[in-house]
Image (tube, helix red, strand yellow):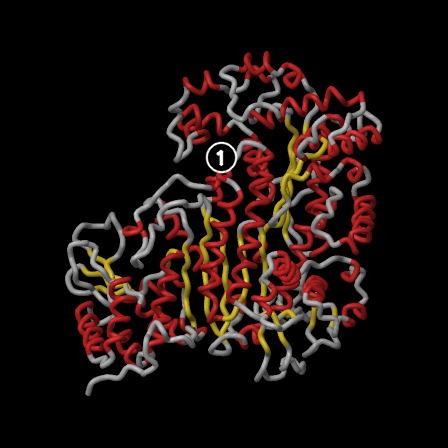
Amino acid sequence: MDKMSSISIAIAWCLAWGNERQPQFDITILQEMREALNQGKEVPGEVQALVKQAQELQGIDKNYFPKTLDELKNKYLDLWNQTTRIGLVYGGATKIKQYVFEAAKLPDIRGASALLDRINLIDLPILFGEYKNVSKSISISKSISISQWLKKNFTDLQAALIPELIIYSTGSNILAFCPAAFVDDLANAIEKRYTEETLTANSCAVGAKFKPLEIRFGLLNNQIETTFWLEKYNSHLHHQLIEAYFSKSDVNDSVQAFKERKSFNELVGKLASLFNKRRSGNDFINRNSRSYPPMFETHPYLKRDEGDRHSAVIKAEGLPNEPWFSEASARKRIVGQISKADDSSIHWYSQAGFNWEPNQIYIPSWVQKFEEFLDVHELANQYYNDCRNPEEARSLIEIGNASKPNGFVAYIYADGNNMGGYIQKIQTPQKYQEFSDDIFQATEQSVYQALAQHLHPHHLKNIQDQDKVQRNGHWIHPFEILTIGGDDVMLIVPADKALAIAKTIGEEFEKILLKKRDDYKSDKTYNPQVVHRYQVEKQDISGNQCKLSMSTGVLITAEDTPIYYAQKLIEQLLKSAKKQAKKLKEYGYYGGTVDFLIMKSVTMISSNISEFRSNGLTKFGTGKQKLKLYAAPYTLHEVGGLLETAKVLKDAEFPRSQLYQIRGLLERSKETAILNYRYFKVRLSDKKAQELLKQQFEDAWCRPKDPANNGNLAPWMSLKEVKEETEEKVTYETIWRELVDLYPFIEQSNDKSNYATSQQPTFKV
């Protein structure tokens, strides 16, 4: 017998187990069957018929779809008559940001994120006996810990679960098969694990039982012959409910839309609906209520923890400033310390008398994985630069120390585009599994590649004592990865490298996916002249697009900016970037977008970014002219152009006072800004500087829409939109303000060969 896929083994396991809590065959027979299927050997005779059914189900041609239910019955009679059901469970953490960012300090945020990552990537897979994400040295002790927990809370569940049942478990969610009798047990175990480990994090898990044929052909009625099928669908095609359920925006063929809907995707859709109902507080039969999420009572006269959310129970003597913790916040802090290998001051937790023992639990570190990535991809020499064994950064002050100028950090929040539309087309469990693995690997590797390409270990210096701990002289990794989950990323990096890192993450994400499978390659093309505002004489960049991409929000701010405030702003920037990506998709562009903001003081924005830009950075000129004093969001190509333009200004050493003067005159009128810019340009005595400004700014950004027009609008550019709101209304925007904001964060090149002279440009008197 040929070696079977994990999905086929999972289906065979569920069929062989049966519908009851005890397997219909001896458990040793099922274990022999699993081992034989993994090795391609002969299975025990008792289960051969069931294994054959699993093979038959998985062997159905992907293009086959029966026109009638009678055809389906006649072709797959054994599967039609199969009474054993297959369980499917979906669950994970909810309201993640509420849990992670309820604390104000980075060590607690780091610990909350690490604790969720551990549950998502390690604990839940180990429920099934999966150890691939756990180091060999601790897999045995971890296995014993989970086994004891399962036996205590769910007596029979452990024997019913095997690793092959997992479809995916990356990110913050898990989707898995299980024997039908254990659907509720497994869903309860997922929710219970989150609550017992975090105390306050929200989670939700749901499950359902399905016929074997439903895995391939979607939901079927109990009496299969009464199922809504093609003949009824064609006669009710224009009914609003039918159209809403089956139609898809990118599928014109109604029959094809029906076929795509009637697949494994429909089962996942049902679980998603159940998930939303349970998360909203609805009760489920035979399951404990989730209407009341984890909560701890407080009292106005009791001491609260640092997050001011829960009553404090201990004073952490031994930590700097001796903070007060509730048990939930104490777990976050100790996990954050363990994940950073900070063993210098963890005795405070053991003295607190808590029963929860973090030292026996594996805490994953993204930095450790990053270091492994460097070794595997032979990037260690490039990154380390003769500095070995750097430590992990412990605070924002240390990350800000690596920036030029010092004292600034950048928050990067990236999330995938077009994911929902792509998932709707996935029709089999195998494709779900492949998709989940591909996205997680592409996301993780793109982050590591960007960090390795743009950063190096940093030597701390001129740092004032942090909480009475002397850190000057230490070498650190100058970044903090808060989370990498599924298709989203949140990290903190030095401010001067933020945009370059964000751009590389987006580009590498698409490149990695395109290398993995042709399924990710889009046949859509776009006109770069319409989509990109940065126009240079380069090869065509409109082809070979990936169907999936990343939008990114980047906030550059001072290191002492409150994290909860930065988190709110970075979410707004990501939302703006995704809105731009959706807009550009109408023109055939499927690539990534970036929105960024440089905030040098917390009082700069009193409301939200959208209102700040609409009210403070949008002016109305003469007639119907609309002047936008900003150009964000950008495409990835435009981000590269923006950095190149800023670098040219920096290398040419243009007087900063003149840059600021032009920025100050932008809001007066379009004509005033154009006149002042040209006056600024012609006063440059260095002709090379004038030429660079013309090439990298005027020709690259400020060309008119009409190709026949050889003039330029510098420092303005007309808004790149094919469809204007009204024909009379003209909108102009400029990158000048963002260039000036970026100017301090652009490193001057040591090699000024592109500038051709080291002489500073002077102005005529």
Please say whether residue 569 is visible from this viewpoint. Answer: no
Front in this rendered view, residue 352 or 511: 511
Q: What residue sits 69% from the left and 72% below the top?
A: 324
The amino acid beneath tag 1 is Lys
Q: Position of residue 419 (x, y in %)?
A: 49, 44
Q: How many labels, in total?
A: 1
Q: Position of residue 48 (x, y in %)?
A: 75, 21
Q: Quadrant of the C terminus?
A: bottom left
Q: What residue sits 31% from the left and 81% below the top?
A: 655
* 176 displayed left or right of 317: left
Q: What residue sits 56% from the left and 45% below the top?
A: 438
Q: Is 752 above or below relative to 5?
A: below
Q: Position of residue 38 (x, y in %)?
A: 73, 34
Q: Dot 1, how many residues are within 10 Å of its Cα: few (below 14), some (14-19), or many (20+)?
A: some
Q: What residue sits 69% from the left and 61% below the top?
A: 328
Q: Position of residue 426 (x, y in %)?
A: 52, 35
Please say whether residue 614 is visible from this viewpoint. Answer: yes
Q: Quadrant of the N terminus?
A: top right
Front in this rendered view, residue 620 or 474: 474
Front in this rendered view, residue 666 or 462: 462
Q: Quadrant of residue 451?
A: bottom right
Which residue is situated farthest in the bottom direction here? 765
Q: Residue under circle 1?
A: 425
* 607 displayed left or right of 55: left
* 722 displayed left or right of 406: left
Q: Is 539 above or below relative to 740?
A: above
* 641 displayed left or right of 483: left
Q: Quadrant of residue 432?
A: top right
SS at circle 1: loop
